[in-house]
Amino acid sequence: MAIISRMTTTTYPPGPRGLPGSTLIAMQRDPLAFFSRVAREHGDVSHFTLLGQHYYVVNEPELIREVLVVKNTSFMKGRGLQRAKAFLGEGLLTSEGEFHRRQRRLSTPAFHRERIMGYGRTMVDYATRMSNRWRDGETIDARGQMAQLTLAIAAKTLFDADVEGEADEIGVALTQILSRFDITYLAFDFMNKLPFPSTIRFNRARTRLDETMYRIIDERRRSGEDRGDLMSMLLLAQDEEGGGGGMSDRQVRDEAMTLMLAGHETTANALTWTWHLLSKHPEVEARLHEEIGDRAPAPEDIPNLRYTEMVFAESMRLYPPAWVIGRMALQDVEIGGFTIPRGSIVIVSPYLMHHHPRYFPDPDVFDPTRFTPEAKASRPKFAYFPFGGGPRVCIGEGFAWMEGVLLIATLAQRWRMRSLSGKPVAVQPVITLRPRHAVPMRVSERR
């Protein structure tokens, strides 16, 4: 175990060294394995260079708190999310400074607890509709089904829009866009300016998604109706505190696209991994079924679905949807006894922390009891942070927890799912941690 020095030094922390290009090759081949090896072999703070850029991997809860909370003003979003502006624009995930604070202030009311409870009824209704479409013994693509479901819920709850008929096209477009954000694209900025096939697919996919979003915005502007959802708040918001006016169509588009991605992609992945894990652990599934019983849940049942919540939490421990967080130092800043120079990138990774044996013994074992109140109280806060932390913590965290618990309970109340592949599901670590391919599963009715 590395000892964290509190004496500031100008020397680099330990880290991988090798021939030029070896780091890029290792990251391209398997980013999760690369970062896991760096953290395992080099301790709580480590360092490497990639194409002349200095990177620092911070993998200790208190130091992660320093980066995300205590010294958050010394950092801005890292290279990955700066590149994501090509799709997300200046949304909550990518914007900085006072503009970000203004946009967050305008969006926050849509995620107040009382409003989220209202969204819960829509979540259950849509999950019930999907459940009713399944047939005993049929094979489904769990990833595709969860993507359709969470997309429909996000569009309905946040924008009061029905996009179920477009779900497949939107899903394909999002997959093409997210697949673009691999290490090669992040390392070589010029690639998005050249007419590679991947660039052409990316641009077409962005245009396809823009068509849907601008159509929704145009319909709502023309109606002038306040439906009490996020879209109404964005369209009608006047920033009285900041002294500014309302949002342009482009600003609304950027925020809406960001929240659709966050409210759809991340939860779809988390649910897919949950069904995969339950399929491999029937004893956990049996205890889950005992808790949910034979009645479809309601939002008011959330306090009684503690084991369901633990299952969802453990799934996000093993497969955190947002698996890595990057920050660029705006000034020289001391973390863990090392001076991180201005312009360097600091990496904190929920995936690494969630697999840290110091806080999660036998870290590769699926065990929901890690999230009993007693177990949670025994760990430091940033040993588990699937939604980030500090001022940039995910604005939809409460939404995601409710959605995950209610969808698991609603679908598992009637169905069991069994994986049809004997091989591990391949992981694709891009902006999110998603399955690389379809996840075929057979559904069977509970008897």
Image (cartoon, rainbow, N blue to C red):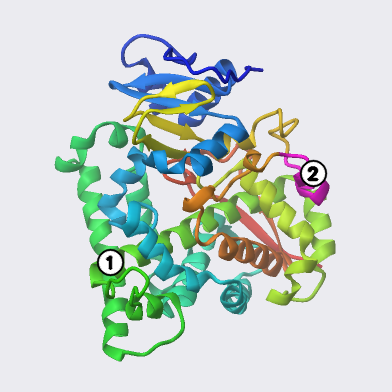
In this rendering, position of residue 83 left or right of residue 32: left
Give the vertical position of 127 relative to 185 (above or below). Answer: below
In this rendering, position of residue 76 left or right of residue 397: left
Q: Nearer the viewer, residue 262 or 332?
A: 332
Instruction: Give the overall secondary structure of the magenta segment.
Output: helix
Q: Amino acid at mark 1?
A: Gln
Of pointers 1 and 2, the one earlier in the residue sequence: 1
Q: Amino acid at mark 2?
A: Ala
Labels 1 & 2 near each other (Cβ < 8 A): no
Give the vertical position of 25 relative to 295 (above or below). Answer: above
Identify the image quadrant of residue 233.
bottom left
Give the total of numbered labels: 2
Q: Label 2's element?
A: helix
Q: Residues within 10 Å of mark 2 (few under 14, many from 20)?
A: few
Q: Label 1's element?
A: helix
Q: Residues within 10 Å of mark 1 (few under 14, many from 20)?
A: some
Q: Which residue is mark 1?
A: 251
Range of magenta residues:
366-379
Quadrant in which the N terminus is drawn: top right
Identify the image quadrant of residue 141.
bottom right
Residue 145 is situated, as x and y percent measured from the top left of the image, at 53, 62
Residue 165 appears anywhere in the view: yes
Residue 315 is situated, as x and y percent measured from the top left of the image, at 65, 48
